[in-house]
Image (spheres, rainbow, N blue to C red):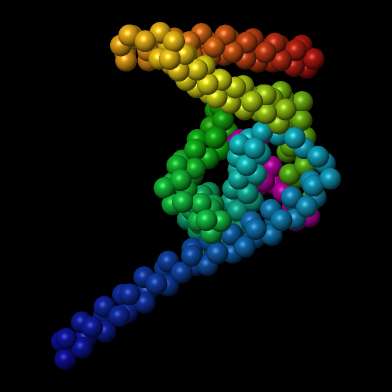
Amino acid sequence: MTKRKAASDNTATEASAGDATSPDVSIMDACIAHAKEVKATQLELIKSKGYDFAPEFKDMTIQLYLLGVMWRFAESMGGADDARELAFAALGELFLQERMPKQKVTKRIDFLRKMSKIEEDHNALAVAIGYESEPGDNSLAELFDHYVDDTQVSGAFWRLYDRGRKIMLYGGLFIAFFVIWFVTLFMPGNSTIAILAAGLISAALFVIPVFLIGIFIYRTKIKKAKQAS
C-alpha cells in the first residue's frame, strides 16, 4: 500500500512538472512558427528594394529583428516568466532547425545577446523595430533604410575587403613559393632555413604594402562618408 502511494505521488509530481514546462515549450514552438512566417513575409517585401549589405551584417540584423518579433509574441501568448529569454531560446532552436551546428548556435546566441543591447542598456534598433512590428508592415525595410548610406556595412565595401584579403593570401603564397623555387633551383647551397626565410620575407614585402593600401582606402571611404553625412 505504501509503495502504491509513493508511486502515485511520483506520478502526480511528474505530471505536474510536465504541466509546468509544457506551456513554455508550446509558446516556443509558436514563436518559431510565427518568426518563420514573419521572416518569409518581410523578405518578400524587401526583395524589390535591392539592398546591398555585407552578408554578416544582413544576417545579424534579420536575426535581431526576429528576436524582437518573438519577444513580443511570447509576451502576448503569456505563460513565460521571461519572454526575452524565451525568445533567445526560440531563436537558438530556429537555428538548429535551419541545420546550424549546435556548437555554432551557442556562440551565435552569445554574440546576438551582446549585440542586442547598446549604450545605457537600451535595446538595439533591430530588436526594438522587431518588437514594435505588426504583421504585413514594412518594418524590416524601414530598419534597413537606416543603414543604406552606411559605408561600413555596404556590400560593395565588404566585397572590396574580401578581394583584398584574397589578394594578400594568394599573392603572398604565390610570391613565397616562387622565391623558394627560384632560390632552390638557381642558388643551390643555401640551407633550408635560409630558403624558407627568403620566401617568408618576400611574401611579407608583398602583403604589407597591400595591407597598408587597404587601410588607406578604408579610411578614405569612411572619411568621405562622414563628410557626406
Which residue occupies 53% across, 40% down?
112
Looking at the image, residue 133 lies above or below residue 209: below
Residue 92 position, x and y percent, is 50, 52
Which residue is at the front of the view, 56 or 215? 215
Please identify the quarter of the rendering in which residue 51 is found.
top right
The residue lying at 78 percent from left, 52 percent from top is 44
Left or right of residue 145: residue 72: left
Quarter of the rendering occupied by the C terminus: top right
Residue 134 lies in the magenta-colored region: yes
Q: Is residue 200 visible?
A: no
Q: In the picture, residue 180 is in which quadrant?
A: top left
- Seen as rendered, the residue at the extreme left is 2
Please name the residue shown 77% across and 26% down the image: 149
Task: Name the one closer to the observer, 118 or 143.
Answer: 143
Residue 194 belongs to the span the image colors magenta: no
- The residue segment tinted magenta is 123-136
Q: Is residue 151 left or right of residue 49?
A: left
Quarter of the image for residue 15 reads: bottom left
Report the number of discs. 0
Residue 40: x and y in percent read 71, 56
The residue at the far right in this view is: 48
Give whichever of 65, 204 is nearer the camera.
Answer: 204
Quadrant where the N terminus is found in the figure: bottom left
Left or right of 100? Residue 41 is right
- Image spot of residue 46 (x, y percent): 79, 46
Residue at 72%, 27% in the rendered image: 156
Residue 134 shows up from this direction:
yes
Q: Please identify the residue farthest to the bottom as the structure is shown.
A: 1
